[in-house]
């Protein structure tokens, strides 16, 4: 995996680690997801945008937006927004299966996972400081290029004998007002509580979701406009 050092706009690369962390609380970062089988790229690469504020994170695909909100009690509340109908489904923390780790949502890869990896190289300073990690599990090799002071994945690859998945950082912006405006736009969508969906089968939007079997506890990942899971998504 190529070692990349990014000089990101609007943040001085010479800023201190503490200042970088503060400036990186409001982020709009585009990512590209790639997939190779036997060394050859398959299908078209997918893209998504990571949006974040100190207590909200969103992963925006073409149609679906998954939002996670960190509550005052540290629980995580997910909301799914569908951009074309401008509708949303809200979940309660108790409706999410499995342990929810905020760092996984906030930075795409958890602090615990990074702690299990081996640091192989470190370059740059301040906002440009990038760490390279590797982890070998059986026949799988995971490599991570990590912008440590901005808590952003620069690049990541998960390589198996016949399949390699990659995640690559593209453009990044730190425009607080623009990012807050985007969350406010989603917040204005009409939403329905997950628990109330069964009582609203007369709603064409909700009926479509039920018929597709899309609504399920703790589901995550990217879906197309018809609720079908996309292949080659990133792995946490």
Image (tube, grey):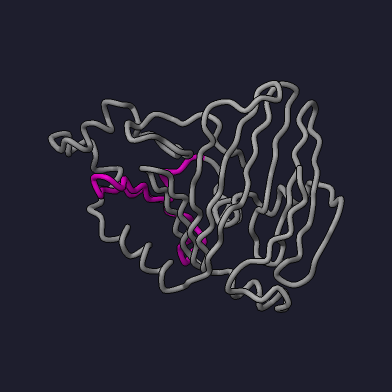
Residue 162: x %, y % from top left: 71, 21
Q: Is residue 131 or residue 42 the one in the foreground?
A: 42
Q: Residue at x 80, y 66 (%)?
A: 124
Residue 163 in the figure: left or right of residue 219: right
> Which quadrant: the N terminus?
top right
Q: Nearer the viewer, residue 75 or 66?
A: 66
The answer to which of 7 and 230 lies nearer the viewer is 7
How far from the left and from the top, in percent, is residue 220? 47, 39
Point out the residue furthest to the right here.
120
In which quadrant of the rendered view does residue 204 lie?
A: top left
Left or right, 127 with respect to 225, comes to right
Residue 214, position as x, y percentages in the image: 35, 31
124 within the magenta span: no
Range shown magenta: 70-97
Above or below, comparing residue 138 to residue 103 in the picture = above
At x 43%, y 45%, the residue is 61
235 versus 57 height, above or below: above
Residue furthest to the left: 202
């Amino acid at each position: 995996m190529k070692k990349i050092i990014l000089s990101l706009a609007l943040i001085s690369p010479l800023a201190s680690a503490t200042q970088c962390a503060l400036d990186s609380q409001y982020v709009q970062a585009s990512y590209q997801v790639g997939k190779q089988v036997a060394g050859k790229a398959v299908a078209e690469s997918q893209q998504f945008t990571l949006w974040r504020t100190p207590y909200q994170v969103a992963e925006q695909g073409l149609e679906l937006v998954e939002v996670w909100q960190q509550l005052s009690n540290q629980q995580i509340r997910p909301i799914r927004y569908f951009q074309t109908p401008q509708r949303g489904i809200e979940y309660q923390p108790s409706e999410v299966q499995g342990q929810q780790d905020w760092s996984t949502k906030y930075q795409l890869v958890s602090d615990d996972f990074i702690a299990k990896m081996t640091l192989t190289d470190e370059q740059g300073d301040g906002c440009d400081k990038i760490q390279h990690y590797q982890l070998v599990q059986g026949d799988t090799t995971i490599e991570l290029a990590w912008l440590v002071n901005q808590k952003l994945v620069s690049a990541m690859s998960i390589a198996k004998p016949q399949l390699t998945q990659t995640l690559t950082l593209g453009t990044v912006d730190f425009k607080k007002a623009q990012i807050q405006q985007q969350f406010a736009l989603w917040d204005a969508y009409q939403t329905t509580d997950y628990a109330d969906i069964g009582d609203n089968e007369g709603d064409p939007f909700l009926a479509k979701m039920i018929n597709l079997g899309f609504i399920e506890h703790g589901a995550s990942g990217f879906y197309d406009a018809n609720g079908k899971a996309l292949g080659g998504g990133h792995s946490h």
